[in-house]
Image (cartoon, grey):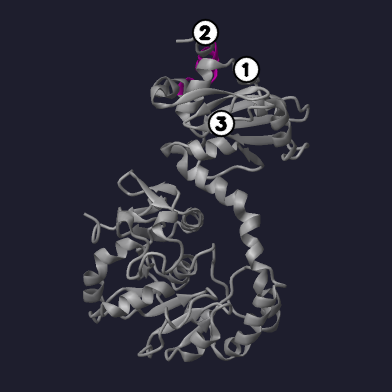
């Protein structure tokens, strides 16, 4: 045990004894740690520099400047080498600094090689693992290196942090003044005026069971069972997202409702043949050719997006929750219809078994498998490949579930991402 580690650990044992016990269990021997030199120096862990190698303090000043000066409470995600913490504690108006560990073994390593006592001793500091809390705290700064190095325990919070950081960039695609958006809403306005308000469906399924089907690879495990269910007179409500419609139909499964929100969904995804008796719930950004060709009843909804602000003033329609993916309004529709028990199919938010989607080829619905550079934990506790936007969609679904404790949510497979707030449905998961 190094002299630095003893001193640092004594402080942590005194202030946060349970945390100290966890740190003593961390295995730092699995980390590849190197000293990296430039105009200054820093520590590199598994090829990732924890800070600048040229001027750590200038970097910390830049990071601190992104946080409001008058904030009495500030959150830092990742521990780094302690530079940002020390800079923030120099603020006279700071009442509390919450430091959230993103990788326990990285923090244990830093405690061995550098004196962290100045910030650890400060009575304003609260130290905890990021994963100890279910949600991110604001205002925050997340140290970039540790967003990459985050361990399994803290991965859910890492995903929420990255989603929040990317939010402004993601929303740029949905500028209400965009010529493409204006043109699309003009082309669907007359259809939306003629079609029914989705509110007519609300409350129509109180206390019953609903199945919400997405297009993740694990859906393939359930085609036969879903077909059998769909043939029964007394069956659960079956709602599917647009890209799941064709795979379901090809396996003899007719959903009750299809939900579509994306302007890129075409007749290739939603062929109109034999759609009588199947309801289409859509947002006005959907393709007018797809809407017009649909033979079953059609219902219009909005999201809370500013994209629909002007249209909402002219034409009143109810809202469904949208968090970036069509899975969100599909699940919200089931909730709004009154379902008390919702089982998710193909809601993988990942690429289990090295496959991107059920019923579609690699890259047909987005990036190819080889483009996946990220991971989430699956229902077996193992890392499974995914992409960044899937992790954001997962975060938003988990938040939605947390806001609806009156509904029991179930997942039909362990192979996709673990969805916080769901249980595994014993009818489908062994």
Q: CA distance from mark 1 to mark 3?
A: 26 Å
Cα–Cα gap, marks 3 and 2: 24 Å
Q: Quadrant of residue 95?
A: top right
In the picture of the structure, the residue carrying the numbered disc 1 is 121
**Left or right: where does residue 377 sit relative to residue 332?**
left
Q: Is 340 in front, or is 400?
A: 400
Crowding around mark 3 (Cα neighbors within 10 Å: few <14, some 14 to 19, many 20+) is: many
Of residue 55 and residue 161, the one placed in the foreground of this image is 55
- Residue 82 visible in image: yes
Asked if residue 75 lies in the magenta stretch, the reply is no
Please identify the quarter of the rendering in which residue 368 is found. bottom left
Instruction: Report the residue at 69% width, 36% height from top.
Output: 63
Label ID, residue 3: 2
Sequence-first tag of 1 and 3: 3
Query: What x and y, as percent, mark residue 105?
Result: 45, 26
User: Can I make out residue 253 in this image?
Assistant: no
Q: Earlier in the sequence, mark 3 or mark 2?
A: 2
Q: CA distance from mark 1 to mark 2?
A: 17 Å
Question: With respect to residue 378, does 368 lie above or below?
Answer: below
**Residue 158 rendering spot, x and y as whole percentages:** 51, 43
Q: Residues within 10 Å of mark 1 (few under 14, many from 20)?
A: some
Q: Residue at the location (28% across, 76% down)?
A: 235
Q: Does the magenta portion include 16? A: yes
Residue depth check, mark 1 versus mark 3: number of the one nearer the observer: 3
The disc label shown at residue 429, or none: none
Q: Is residue 182 above or below residue 210?
A: below
Dominant secondary structure of the residues highlighted in magenta in the image: helix
Name, please, the residue furthest toward the front. Answer: 38
Q: Which residue is mark 3?
A: 49
- What stretch of residues is rendered in magenta? 7-18
């Amino acid at each position: 045990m190094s002299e630095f580690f003893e001193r640092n650990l004594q402080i942590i044992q005194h202030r946060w004894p349970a945390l100290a016990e966890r740190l003593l269990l961390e295995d730092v021997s699995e980390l590849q740690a190197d000293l990296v030199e430039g105009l200054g120096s820093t520590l590199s862990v598994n090829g990732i520099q924890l800070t600048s190698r040229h001027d750590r303090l200038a970097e910390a000043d830049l990071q601190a400047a992104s946080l409001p000066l008058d904030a009495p409470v500030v959150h830092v995600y990742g521990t780094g080498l302690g530079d940002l913490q020390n800079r923030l504690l120099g603020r006279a108006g700071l009442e509390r600094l919450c430091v959230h560990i993103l990788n326990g073994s990285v923090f244990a390593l830093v405690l061995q090689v550098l004196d962290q006592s100045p910030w650890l001793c400060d009575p304003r500091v609260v130290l905890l693992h990021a994963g100890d809390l279910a949600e991110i705290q604001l205002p925050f700064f997340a140290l970039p290196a540790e967003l990459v190095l985050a361990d399994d325990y803290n991965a859910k919070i890492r995903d929420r942090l990255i989603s929040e950081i990317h939010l402004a960039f993601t929303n740029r695609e949905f500028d209400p003044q965009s010529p493409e958006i204006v043109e699309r809403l003009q082309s669907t306005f007359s259809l939306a005026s003629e079609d029914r308000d989705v509110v007519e469906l609300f409350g129509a399924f109180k206390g019953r069971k609903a199945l919400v089907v997405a297009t993740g690879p694990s859906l393939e495990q359930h085609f036969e069972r879903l077909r059998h269910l769909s043939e029964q007179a007394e069956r659960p409500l079956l709602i599917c997202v647009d890209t799941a419609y064709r795979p379901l139909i090809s396996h003899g499964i007719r959903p009750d409702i299809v939900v579509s929100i994306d302007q890129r969904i075409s007749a290739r995804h939603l062929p109109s043949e034999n759609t009588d008796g199947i309801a289409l719930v859509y947002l006005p950004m959907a393709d007018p050719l797809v809407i017009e060709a649909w033979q079953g009843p059609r219902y219009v909804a909005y999201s809370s997006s500013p994209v629909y602000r002007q249209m909402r003033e002219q034409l009143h329609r109810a809202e469904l929750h949208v968090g970036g993916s069509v899975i969100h309004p599909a699940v919200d529709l089931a909730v709004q219809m009154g379902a008390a028990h919702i089982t998710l199919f193909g809601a993988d938010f990942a690429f289990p078994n090295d496959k991107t989607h059920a019923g579609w080829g690699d890259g047909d619905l987005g990036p190819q498998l080889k483009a996946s550079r990220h991971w989430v934990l699956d229902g077996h506790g193992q890392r499974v490949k995914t992409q960044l936007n899937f992790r954001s969609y997962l975060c938003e679904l988990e938040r939605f579930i947390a806001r609806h404790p009156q509904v029991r949510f179930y997942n039909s497979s362990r192979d996709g991402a673990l969805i916080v707030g769901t249980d595994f449905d014993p009818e489908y998961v062994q």
